[in-house]
Image (cartoon, grey):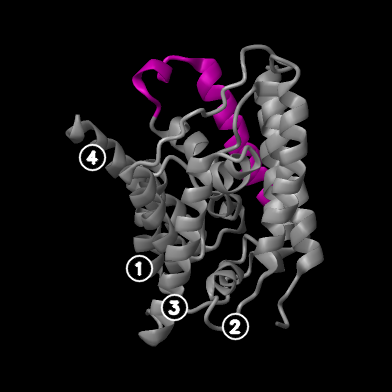
Amino acid sequence: MKKPLAAFVAGLIFAVGLAIAGMTQPSKVVGFLDFFGQWDPSLAFVMVGAIGVHFVLFRLILKRGTPVFGGRFEVPTRKDLTPALLGGSALFGIGWGLGGFCPGPGIASLASFGAEAAVFVGTMALGMLAYRLFEAQRR
Amino acid sequence: MEHFTPLASTLGGVLIGISASLLLLFNGRIAGISGIFSGLLLPRPADRADAQELGWRAAFVGGLVVGGAVMFALQPQLFAVTYDRSLLTIAVAGLVVGFGVRLGSGCTSGHGVCGISRFSRRSIVATVTFIATGALTVLAVRLLGGVS
C-alpha cells in the first residue's frame, strides 16, 4: 500500500500546485499562449518554479540508486527526434491553444463540476483510445 | 497585464516540482500525467493484470481529483472558465490533445517539467513545439474572430 499512498500524495500536491499556479483557469493558459496579443507571462513562472525544484532534486534522488519503496528508477533514456514526437507535440499544442486545457489541469478540474473540464477529459480519453487504435494499425 | 501572477505561479510551480520529485523518490516514476492517465485507462496488455501498476496510477489520478476538489472548496475562483469557447470546440481540443500527447509521448508535465529538468533533448524539442503550435492556434483563433 506504500506506493499508492506516495502516488496519491504526489497527485494531491500536483493538483494544489496547478490550481495555485493558475493552470486550472483555461483563459489564463490561453493568455500565456497569446504572445502576439495581451500576453500574460505568468505560466512561464510555473515552469521556472517546477523545473528549478525538480532539476535540483532529480539529481539528488537518482544518487540513491533505487526508489525508497523498491523497484528501480524508470526514467526515459531515448534521445531520437522522431516525426511522431514532433507531430504529436504539434497536435497537442493545437488542442492546448484551442481549449486552454492540458491533461493535468483537466483532470484536476473535474471536481469543479464544470462542463468544460468534463467534456475535455472525456474527449481526451477518446483521443487516447483513437491513438491506441492507430498504433495497432501501424504495426 | 492585470492578471499577471508571478508569485502565485512560481509557488504553484514549486509545488509541482516537489510532487514530481516525491513520485520519483518513493516510486521511481516520472510524473507525466498523460502517460499515467492513459496507462490507467488503456493499460498495455502486460500491465492489465498488474494490480500494482494500475494501483499507483489510480492513486495518482485520484490524488489529482481530490487535490482539485480541496482547492475548489477553498478557492473556487481558481477554476473559473471565463472564455467564450463552446463545448464543441473544447471537445475537438480534447480529442486532439488525447491523440497528440500519446503520439508525442508526453504533455506539459512529462516533457515540460520532468523532461526539461533532465535536459532531455526530446522533451526540450517537444515543449518548444507545443508552445509554438499553441501560440499559433491562439493567434489563428483571434484572427478568425474567435471560435464559437
Residue B42, placed above or below residue A21: above
Can marks 1 and 2 be said to lie on one chain?
A: no
Left/right of residue B126 with respect to residue A67 in the rendered view: left
| Mark drawn on residue A38 | 2
Tag 3 secondary structure: helix
Q: Chain of mark 4?
A: A
Which residue is nearer to you in this view: B118 or B108?
A: B118
The amino acid sitting under disc 1 is Leu
- Parent chain of label 2: A
Q: Of the residues under marks 1 and 3, which one precedes in the sequence? A: 1
- Was residue B67 drawn as part of the magenta stretch in this picture? yes
- Tags 2 and 4 on a common chain: yes
SS class, disc 4: helix
Q: Residue at x 70, y 57 (%)?
A: A46
How far apart are the two marked residues, 2 and 3, measured between alpha carbons?
Answer: 11 Å
Is residue B48 positioned above or below A14 on the image? above
Range covered by the magenta-colored residues: B43-68
Could you tell which of marks 2 and 4 lies nearer the N-terminus?
2
